[in-house]
Image (cartoon, rainbow, N blue to C red):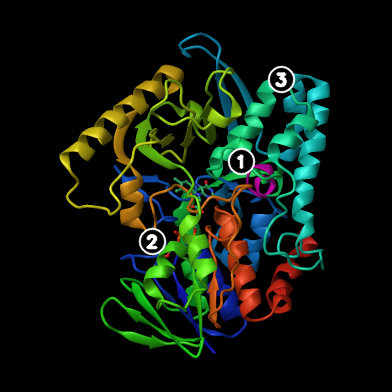
Amino acid sequence: MSTLVIGSGITGMAAALLLAQQGEETTILEAAPSPAPLLRGFERDNLHFDTGFHCGAGLRQGGLLRLWLQTLGMMDFISDDACYPMQEEFHFPSDGDGTVSDVAHFPATLDDLFPTVSAQFGTQAANNLKQLVQDMLGVIRHSPYTNPHSDAELQFSFSRASRLHDVLIRAQLPPRLTRMVQARCSLYGVAPHMAGFHEFSLVGGLYFDSSHGLHGGGTTLRDAALAALKRANVPVRCHARVTHIRHSNNRIEGVELSNGESISCTRCIFTGHPGQLIHILDKGALRPAFFRHITEMRETMQALLVFGITRNPALQGKTVFLMPPDTVDEQNLLAPLEQPAPLVYLICGDGLNGHFPITLISPTQQSFPADSPTPRSDAYLRWKRAATARLVQYARSRLPEINDLRVLDAASPLSLRQWITGSTGSLYGLAHDIETLPLFPVIRLKGLFLAGQHILLPGILGGIISAAVAVGLATSHDSVLQGFRQWTRNV
Ligand SMILES: Cc1cc2nc3c(=O)[nH]c(=O)nc-3n(C[C@H](O)[C@H](O)[C@H](O)COP(=O)(O)OP(=O)(O)OC[C@H]3O[C@@H](n4cnc5c(N)ncnc54)[C@H](O)[C@@H]3O)c2cc1C
């Protein structure tokens, strides 16, 4: 069997590593000039800025993400002291214009959660949150891909029976504590009233288990994956854009690249945006219902990202949420930049020589051209300059710690589209909310599997688990899970 993995993001690299562990001949094809364009981040003024990875949930010893990185062999190339704790700070405006804030926070580890919350909100609130967190972390016990001790049947999607909204009402948390939990919906681009409890638990909930940054950020993850791929003799071919997936008699035969090259395979794992499949598969290869489903699926929010540096170390190792006023309802919690008091979150990464990189992220409602025109139009450049200035001014007014922020770059949905083939420019790809039916990793065409943030959940963990499920379907679940289960002694 020879497998082609399309895409070298975390999902593609994870899938290729798992296949190689089973002795499968595997090659990764990536359209971009270098591997993992979203994950790797970039450098400006000698500082590393992250794009696709700032903070990981479950990276502690024995945590779920750590177990999967061990299973993939990536932890062999990441030193234990590369992980550092990341705290979350929530700034609630306490006056009319938001220049004064009440600050509350969640700590980086579960052990510190209850004393911290108790000190801020009282014992009753801490106890109620404790019950809620137990329920959230209980969700990961249900699947053999999230719990190495489980031999439960595999389910391809999460239960949509319970909504985060209803669970939070039952939890009876103080309003601001409820807000802090809801703000984590921004980490996967779903408005709180649209969030399913199970999906939320695996993204927002798992940050209660533990929350860590990595020195070197996404580059550390990319380099660890590339080192593990090299050890496993898996080639990663860049500048290799797949333009056509060949098949006959309903079975995959190979792919064609934009340079005209044709490569045969018996299996293919596609990790890009499913909307792009429509363009690289022959008409009729997809069932009409599946075709319609892909075209009708909602995207997560679009966002403006601003990258700058500060000399103030106060925010290092923190994710900060600038919360809208308490009067804003949950439907509007992820209010875009165009609104008077938008939710903005910012992450402060590793500093160098007293300079600290800051990434500001704010949803935006701006509409963009369908393609990614180069050069950009004057109107677009004017919008980007003005929106960047507005975001920075707003963040500075809410957070005096970044008064000295020097802007080095900004990224709009057009930038995301340009970096990542198939990206629509939304922050986290297809939405995983209670109204959207998930896509299955298998389709009518035999030998073709779908994986990645669009299929299961966004995030490094979502990508890895999705890759594992796809490889499990392509080979056998037992052989994939065998590797994962051997790490249980550390749990
Ligand atoms: C600003 C931002 C911050 C984030 N922060 C975090 C965080 O702190 N923690 C976290 O866990 N997650 C975070 N995420 C989410 C996380 O980065 C993504 O969910 C994850 O990286 C997606 O990985 P993927 O492999 O599924 O997709 P991608 O990384 O998009 O990989 C798909 C790859 O396929 C390639 N491709 C597509 N079509 C073709 C084709 N036809 N031929 C060849 N190649 C093709 C693309 O070029 C791309 O490289 C963040 C995301 C963003 C945007």
Name the residue nearer the viewer: 235 or 306: 306
Q: Which residue range is magenta in the image?
A: 199-205
Determine the CA span between mark 3 and mark 1: 28 Å
User: Left or right: 66 with respect to 136?
Assistant: left
C-beta proximity under 8 Å, tags 3 and 2:
no
| Whole-percent x, y for residue 146 in the image | 72, 59
Residue on which the image places disc 3:
120
Question: Which quadrant of the rendered structure holds the C terminus?
Answer: bottom right
Dominant SS of magenta comes to: helix
Residue on which the image places disc 2:
422
Residue 299's disc number: none
Kindly tell me whether residue 207 is visible in this rendering: yes
The verdict on label 2 being within 8 Å of ligand 1 is yes
Work out whether 278 lies above or below 348.
below
User: Left or right: 272 with respect to 459?
Assistant: left
Q: What is the quadrant of residue 474 in the picture? A: bottom right
